[in-house]
């Protein structure tokens, strides 16, 4: 009996420590993790890597594209990818985030992040 592949999550965060905590949290729960320090790097990874299940991105990042613009681009180009957006500087309602994405305000606990990722991935599986 073949086992289902582990979902892949792309974590996009320019602050190394925050990214490290998110990555460790999700790896500990069995997800395959990819990391990017900004939206440009994230888009390159998305173009090169099939089967990413979810993107978890900060809004405020260096470069020409912020996390909300990244989420919009992901929703257009890869509609199958779940989206979670986070920020400590701004607060958004979920309806502002494209493609039925959700907002997780900073500071968040590792348990809150893990629970939200699981909820988003289960919801997508039930829709499909």
Image (cartoon, grey):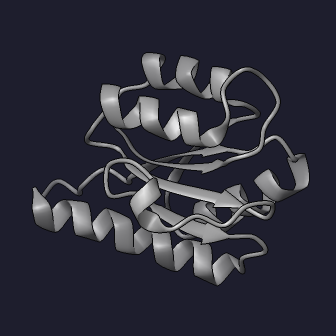
> Does residue 25 sit above or below 33 in this rendering?
below
In the image: residue 123, left or right of residue 94:
left
> Does residue 34 sit above or below 94 in this rendering?
above
Q: Position of residue 87 (x, y in %)?
A: 72, 59
At 33% across and 25% down in the image, what residue appears? 77
Q: Position of residue 70 (x, y in %)?
A: 54, 33
| Quadrant hosting residue 29 | bottom right
Quadrant the N terminus occupies: bottom left
In the image: residue 14, left or right of residue 109:
right
- Depth check: 14 or 91 in front? 91
| Quadrant hosting residue 108 | bottom right
At 25% across and 69% down in the image, what residue appears? 123
Q: Position of residue 88 (x, y in %)?
A: 79, 64
In the image: residue 85, left or right of residue 87:
left
- How many marks the image carries: the answer is 0
Q: Position of residue 127 (x, y in %)?
A: 12, 62
Quadrant the C terminus occupies: bottom left
At 19% across and 62% down in the image, what residue appears? 125
- Depth check: 82 or 71 in front? 71
At 60% across and 81% down in the image, what residue appears? 112
> Does residue 94 sit above or below 56 in this rendering?
below
């Amino acid at each position: 009996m073949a086992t289902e592949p582990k979902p892949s999550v792309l974590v996009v965060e320019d602050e190394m420590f925050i990214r490290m905590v998110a990555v460790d949290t999700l790896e500990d729960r069995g997800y395959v993790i990819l990391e990017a320090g900004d939206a440009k790097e994230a888009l390159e990874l998305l173009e090169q890597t099939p089967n990413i299940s979810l993107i978890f991105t900060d809004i405020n990042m260096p470069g020409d594209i912020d996390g909300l613009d990244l989420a919009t681009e992901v929703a257009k180009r890869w509609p199958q990818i779940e989206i979670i957006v986070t920020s400590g500087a701004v607060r958004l309602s979920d309806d502002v985030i494209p493609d039925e994405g959700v907002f997780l305000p900073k500071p968040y606990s590792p348990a809150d992040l893990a629970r939200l990722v699981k909820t988003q991935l289960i919801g997508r599986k039930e829709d499909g």
